[in-house]
């Protein structure tokens, strides 16, 4: 029997207003007590906005274009990302490669751990119960819901971010992209392909 | 075996709803707050945030949205650490409600 | 100090049933997998969560489990796996 709760978060306006008031109150109290400033919060928001899937796409595109870089990235994900001038701020990143034989999928069943410093904030579905509960138990069924059907011979490897490591999937390079510049390769790399629910996009036409 | 409210790997669940929403300012502010509290100010740990969330009863855990859970936990942890008192928090929240301040 | 476990070593996750904050999901308790790699030493989240300093650091491993060992009704390939990060104090060596 499926877990008995409402689909997604229920929006009770009074309850929402209560927690928004709480957030405002906590922020104001901390500012008044000199713990942090309004500017700190604004700066932090801006920094987070500067992180998003475009950073990850650069990493993936470079790995596709440069086999030596790919090897370095797979052996030390954090170092590999930093090599491109992307600060990881202590993130311990493991990059896992999709091949014909293995398809990788990332989840955090216990909460919502996600490589935020490279991909930005996670999508809602990644943080909610259906994905968290089912990705480890029926990954192929979850993949199918995202439109991803794997060959019968491909092993599925799920990574549950239970502790200090974070994960980025290196999707397989699409065919018919020989000689493409990295900027163009990056356009094929979606956020969902770096979580593992979808492959990279195919070239049009 | 006792299972934490968050320990949901493998339990039966519904289809993934592939909805997304742009993060609202109030959510971004809570996120930034946690980054600052666990980073620059070193006041709390993300492990404490998680423990606070896990201490919610199962109905609250399931009904509250993601950042509602976060602020509930952050408040609890900061009160534990005596950054402010329950009374201070409640008083301020009442003032905000009277003023009708938008988040 | 415990020596680190090598990749390929067979390990079983403790079935201990305790309360408090922990990062070992129920679905792998009592299950057997293999060490995929040692991730290093990290402060213990179980004590960090209650305001402790998390010391001494605990060794963290990635452990790989076959899906059909975890779930009686698993539908997929016999080679499908789940990899999790598990702290050494939750792992028992198979004798």
Image (cartoon, coloured by chain):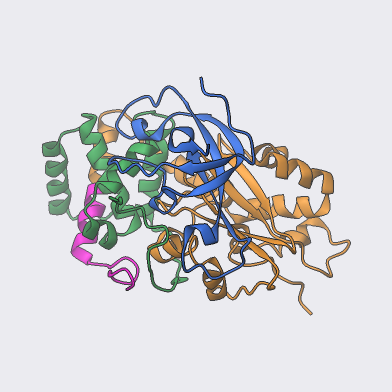
Chain colours: A orange, B green, C blue
> Picture quarter containing residue B58?
bottom left
Screen quadrant of the C terminus of chain A: bottom right
Screen quadrant of the N terminus of chain A: bottom left
Q: Report the label total.
A: 0
Please provide the residue range marked out in magenta.
A1-22
Report if residue A11 lies within the magenta region.
yes
Relative to C78, A58 lies left or right: right
Give percent across and percent down for residue A113.
Answer: 47, 48
Relative to C47, A101 lies left or right: right
Residue located 72% across and 43% down the image:
A73
Residue located 53% across and 72% down the image:
A141
Using the image, determine if residue B68 lies above or below residue B21: above
Q: Residue furthest right?
A: A179
Question: C3 and B14: which one is in front?
Answer: C3
Question: C34 and A94: which one is in front?
Answer: C34
Residue located 52% across and 23% down the image:
C2
Report if residue B97 lies within the magenta region.
no
Residue A84 visible in the current orientation: no
Using the image, determine if residue C64 lies above or below residue C87: below
Using the image, determine if residue A48 lies above or below residue A177: above
Question: C79 and B65: which one is in front?
Answer: C79
> Picture quarter containing residue B100?
bottom left
Relative to A196, B25 lies left or right: left
Q: Residue furthest front?
A: C95
Give percent across and percent down for residue C54.
Answer: 39, 27
Give percent across and percent down for residue C85.
Answer: 51, 43
Give percent across and percent down for residue A158.
Answer: 56, 57
Q: Residue furthest bottom?
A: A205
Residue located 29% across and 32% down the image:
C50
Residue C49 visible in the current orientation: yes
> Picture quarter containing residue A80?
top right
């Amino acid at each position: 029997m499926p877990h008995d709760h409402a689909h997604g978060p229920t929006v009770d306006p009074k309850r929402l207003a209560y927690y928004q008031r709480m957030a405002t109150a906590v922020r104001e109290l901390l500012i008044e007590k000199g713990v942090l400033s309004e500017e700190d919060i604004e700066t932090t928001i801006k920094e987070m906005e500067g992180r998003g899937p475009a950073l990850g796409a650069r990493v993936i595109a470079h790995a596709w274009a440069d086999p030596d870089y790919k090897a370095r990235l797979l052996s030390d994900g954090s170092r590999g990302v930093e090599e491109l001038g992307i600060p990881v701020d202590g993130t311990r990143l493991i990059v896992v490669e999709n091949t014909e034989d293995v398809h990788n999928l990332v989840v955090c069943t216990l909460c919502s751990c996600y490589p935020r410093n490279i991909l930005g904030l996670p999508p809602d579905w990644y943080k909610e119960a259906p994905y968290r509960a089912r990705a480890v138990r029926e990954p192929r069924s979850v993949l199918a819901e995202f439109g991803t059907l794997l060959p019968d011979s491909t092993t599925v490897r799920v990574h549950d971010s239970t502790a200090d490591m974070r994960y980025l999937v290196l999707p397989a390079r699409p065919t018919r992209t020989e000689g493409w510049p990295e900027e163009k390769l990056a356009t094929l790399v979606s956020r969902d392909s770096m979580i593992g629910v979808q492959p990279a996009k195919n070239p049009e036409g | 075996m006792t299972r934490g409210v968050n320990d949901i790997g493998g339990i039966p669940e519904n289809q993934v709803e592939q909805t997304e929403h742009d993060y609202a300012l109030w959510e971004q502010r809570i996120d930034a707050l946690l980054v600052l509290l666990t980073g620059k100010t070193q006041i709390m740990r993300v492990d404490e945030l998680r423990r606070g969330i896990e201490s919610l009863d199962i109905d609250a855990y399931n009904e509250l949205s993601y950042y509602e859970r976060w602020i509930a936990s952050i408040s609890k942890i900061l009160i534990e650490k005596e950054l402010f008192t329950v009374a201070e928090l409640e008083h301020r929240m009442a003032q905000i409600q009277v003023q009708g301040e938008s988040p | 100090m415990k020596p680190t476990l090598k990749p390929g070593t067979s390990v079983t996750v403790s079935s201990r049933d305790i309360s408090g904050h922990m990062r070992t999901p129920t679905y792998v308790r009592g299950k057997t997998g293999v060490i995929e790699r040692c991730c290093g030493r990290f402060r213990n989240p179980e004590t960090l969560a209650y305001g402790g300093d998390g010391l001494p650091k605990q060794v963290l491993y990635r452990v790989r489990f076959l899906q059909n060992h975890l779930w009686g009704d698993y539908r997929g390939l016999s080679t499908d796996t789940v990899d999790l990060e598990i702290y050494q104090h939750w792992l028992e060596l198979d004798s």
